Image (cartoon, grey):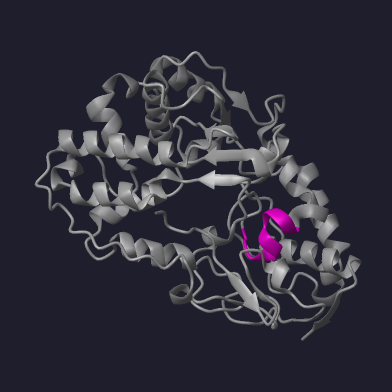
Amino acid sequence: MTYSRPRLYRSMYGQSKWLHEVLPVNLTIDLHQPGLFDLMGFHENTPFLEAKWVPYNETPARVYLPVTQGCKGSTVDLLADRVFGAFKLAILTKWDARKYHVMTCSSGYDSRMMLCAMKELMADGLVDDNFILFEADGEADLAQECINAVGLDRKLQVYNKDQDNPNEYHALSFDFKNAWIALNGGMVTYPVNRWFTPFLTLPYSQKNTQVFTYYGGNETSKALMMRNQNINWYFWWHYHHQLATFPLYGEMVHPYYNLDLQTVMNEYWTDEALKYIQPGDSIAKLVIQVKFPELMGIYKMGTGDVKAAGYNTLSNRLYEQCKIDYEHSWLFKQVGHGNTCPTNQIEYNPWWGMYGIASLCDHLIERGYKINVV
């Protein structure tokens, strides 16, 4: 069993993880509703009065995991061993041999644990070699170094590998006509969907592709260390965060959302682990230190490194194009920029929410929908 990631929306026409699928043809947009662009939403509002969130308690995302933390009387070595075993099993139980497999790979500790897991699973004949390693965040050189260090004879496939300008790296994400898809109609105020857009460049159909990610690794590991914010609190928190509404490419598999893995992480937890990891770290860092220490010498890029390299800043060309696209939209003609201001930063910002809503409105109007503004 796994935690169900997506936030759901509903109207009189039904419910869906896609906002546009529940919208009637006659709509009322109200951008003055409380909390529309909040990173954490403690409300049920969407830009359209006809659609609301489905409350957490009424969705499959509501999971209660009855675990007693530390009940196994574990050690750090045993914790690392059990977590690694459960992580491999979480991959194996979801592995569909009929599909293409994409293993996301960066310089992070979760990726290093995945590489070790895949090496062992292949050696044991439990999975075949029908998979690619894919990097889409400017960490290709270090990710390849990790692959080589593990001993996998694999060449990393790199998103936008021929783009020399970091400020243009995410150019595909700023296609205004289709921006509403990756941003779920403006329910996300972060303009780049790293779990969707880069994968569109791969030669596989979404229907026939499994993408394995390490999503939730840091957060579920933090839940082990925070006495008042355990794994069940995390499930609740995640549903209310904008992260829960990002559309995903293909069949995305998040091993950290496997409840058996979460049970192992909790039951075998020992506070001795705090000598190895701190809140903000993934438990994979502990696994690598204890079981695969030879991989610790490779530098791990962080979000600060990516930002400093320029990957989170738009080029002047892209920035001006985004403003032009928005200012030619139907929504801009109705409300201007609202209470927002254009930005050239790839970060959570209400203006990117307006950008996504504007893209959706143009799409709906082209299809014959009628939208009234209040």
At x 26% / y 29%, what residue is drawn?
Answer: 289
Asked whether residue 318 is in view, the answer is yes
Q: Residue 181: say if magenta.
A: yes
Quadrant where the N terminus lies? bottom left
Q: Residue 213: image x %, image y %?
A: 49, 41
At x 86% / y 74%, what residue is drawn?
Answer: 369
At x 63% / y 82%, what residue is drawn?
Answer: 33
Which picture quadrant has residue 242? Answer: bottom right
Question: Is residue 220 shown above or below 108?
Answer: below
Which picture quadrant has residue 234? Answer: bottom left
Q: Residue 260: say if magenta.
A: no
Q: Residue 35: image x %, image y %?
A: 56, 76
Comparing 225 with 120, the one in front is: 120
Left or right, residue 241 beside residue 188: left
Left or right, residue 344 beside residue 39: right
Which picture quadrant has residue 327? Answer: bottom right
Range shown magenta: 180-189
Left or right, residue 356 beside residue 370: left
Residue farthest to the left?
73
Q: Residue 281: image x %, image y %?
A: 33, 43
